[in-house]
Image: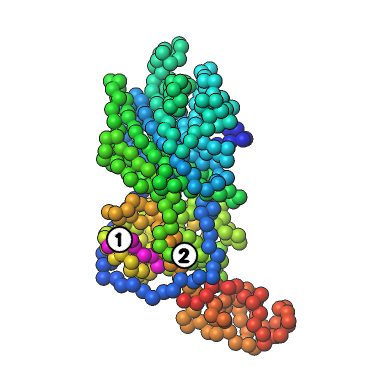
Amino acid sequence: MPNDSAFPTHASSPRASRAARLGASAALLLLGALGPSGCVAGADEEILGVATLPWGSYDLTSSYTGNIDDTRGWIIEWEVPELLNESTAWTAVGQWYYNIESGIYHTPEGWFVYYFGDDNGVAGNHPNCNNQWGSGGTCGGTLGGNLGYLQPGQQVVFRYERCTPAHVADVNGTRICLHVDMKDGTGWQFLAEDAPGTVEMYTHDVEHWATEGYVTPQFSCEAPIKMLRQELKTTSGVWQPMSGASTWSFNQVAPYAYQNRNLTASPSTWESCTPPPDGSGDGLRGEYFANTSLSGTPLVRTDPGVSFDWGEGSPAAGIPADNFSVRWTGEFEPRYSETYTLTTQSDDGVRVWVNGALVINNWTPHSPTEDSVTLSLVAGQRYDLKVEYFDSGGGALSRLYWSSPSQVREVIPQGRLHAAGASCSGVPAWASGQVYSPGAQVVQGGHLWAATQQIWWSNPDCPPSNPASWCPAEWTDLGSCN
Ligand SMILES: [Ca+2]
Ligand SMILES: [Ca+2]
C-alpha cells in the first residue's frame, strides 16, 4: 500500500478480515403481542451527528464470497453519483480490490479515478494519469485533458485480468493488469501488478473520511452511486456475467442506504444514496459510564442511533478508552408489519431488551461479534428498547441493525428511534437543608440530577453561598424526566 502524507492510506484488508471474523447467532422470539408503551422522548439533549463515525468509515460495503482463485479477471462498471452537498470530506464511492486497489474518488476538487499497484515501470502510462502516490496514481482530477474531472452520470469501467504481452512487454501472464476505461474515446489505460496469488475482491460503496471538521457527503437518490455491470473471467478465459444474491453480502450504516438492488439479475446491480430522513424520532438516550458495570453517575447525551466504532479510543470526554459501559434507552418504531431481525455488532459485551424482554444476551468480553433475534413487529407501534454494552479493553465497537423482508439490513435510523427521558420514578425531590452524598439523585425543575460532590446543608462552595438554595454547579444534569 502507498503511504503518501498528502493522501489517506487505506486499510481495507484488515477490515475485510474483521468482517470475516464476525460470528453470527440467531434466536427466534415472537413479540407480536407486545403493545406500544407510553414513553416520551427527552427533547432538550444534544443531538450528535454522524461525525462520531471514525476516520475512514466504510459506510456501505459489499463483499464477494465466491472462489477468487477460480477467476482470471473481473470487470466492474460504475456511474459517478451526484453529490448533494459541498462536501469537504475525502470520499471513495466504489473502492475495490482485485489485487490492485482502485476506485472513484472525490475531493473538494472533483471526481477522479485512482489506483494503487506495484510499480513495474508501466504504472500510469497514459499522458493523463500520474503516479504521484507511491506506485499508483490518478487519472483525471487536476490533470485535466480528456481525462479531466469525472462528471455525475459518467460511466467508468475497470477491467482486471492477467497481463499479456499485448498489454505489457515481457510478461508471461503472472501479473494482473488493470485497465480503466474512462469512456473518453482513447482506449484503455493500464498498469501492471506482480504476484496475483494474494487476490482479494470486494467493494466499498462509500468510504469517507468524514470526521471532525469535515462534512459527511450526501448522495442524491435521483442520481445515486450505481454499480452497473460485473463480469468474471473463468479459468478457461470466458467472460461471463456475475450474479446471485449469495455472491454479495451487504452492510450499511446511516446515513447511506442501498436502493434498487437487483442481485439475482445477470449481471447483478445496485444503487446507493443518502435517503431523506425517515420518521420524526430523535435517537436514543445514551448513558456513558466510566466502568464496565453501568454504575455511578453517567455522562448523558442523545445519540442518533447505536452505530459506533471507537477503535482503541474513548467514546466521550471523561470516559476511558477501556473499561467503560453504555446504556441506550428509548423506543423504536418499525416501518412494516412483518418479521424483523435485530442484530448487534459488538466488541465487547452486549444485551438488548425489547418491551422488557431480554432478547440478546452476550455479556462477555469478545472480539467483534454479531448476535441476532427475530421479532414479529407491527408498523407504527413503538417498542421499548434498552441496549447495554461494555468494552473491557482493546477495540470498542457497538452497532444495532434491523432488517425485514421489505428492507435490507441497516443501522436503525435516528428517525425511527425515540430517546427515553430520565427515569425519575421514586427519586426524591431536592430539599433545602439536606446532606447529599456524591452520586445521590434528586428531582428538581423536572430534571433528574446527581450530586457531583458531598453537599452539606451549609456548603459555602456554590455562590451565592446560600445553603438553602438550589445550586446547579453541585449537580450533574441527567436529563428531563420521563
Ligand atoms: Ca477500548
Ligand atoms: Ca474490546
Q: Is residue 335 magenta?
A: yes
Q: Which residue is mark 2?
A: 282
- From the top left corner, tell me how far across and down residue 198 is, in percent: 42, 28
Q: Is residue 425 magenta?
A: no
Q: Which residue is mark 1?
A: 336
Residue 9, by quadrant, is top right
Q: Main secondary structure of the magenta part?
A: loop
Residue at x 35%, y 47% (from the top left corner): 259
On screen, residue 238 above or below 246: above
- From the top left corner, tell me how far across and down residue 85 is, in percent: 52, 48
On screen, residue 476 above or below 167: below
Q: Helix, strand or loop at disc 2?
A: loop
How many numbered marks does the figure carry? Answer: 2
Name the mark on residue 55.
none
Q: Is residue 186 left or right of residue 447?
A: left
Q: Which residues are magenta?
A: 331-337
Determine the residue located farthest toward the top in the rendered image. 170
Q: Helix, strand or loop at disc 1?
A: loop
Q: Is residue 154 left or right of residue 324?
A: left
| Residue 23 in view (yes/no) | yes
Asked if the residues shown at circle 1 and circle 2 are in contact, with their CB atoms under 8 angstroms apart, the answer is: no
> Residue flagged by tag 2: what amino acid is it?
Asp
Residue at x 52%, y 32% (from the top left corner): 149
Determine crowd level at label 2: few under 14, some 14-19, many 20+ residues with C-alpha closer than 10 A. Answer: many
Residue at x 32%, y 28% (from the top left corner): 232
Residue at x 43%, y 20% (from the top left corner): 187
Mark 1 or mark 2: name the one nearer the start of the chain: 2
- From the top left corner, tell me how far across and down residue 225 is, in percent: 42, 41
> Residue flagged by tag 1: what amino acid is it?
Tyr
Q: Is mark 2 within 8 Å of ligand 1?
A: no
Residue 133, by quadrant, is top right
- From the top left corner, tell me how far across and down residue 429 is, in percent: 55, 85
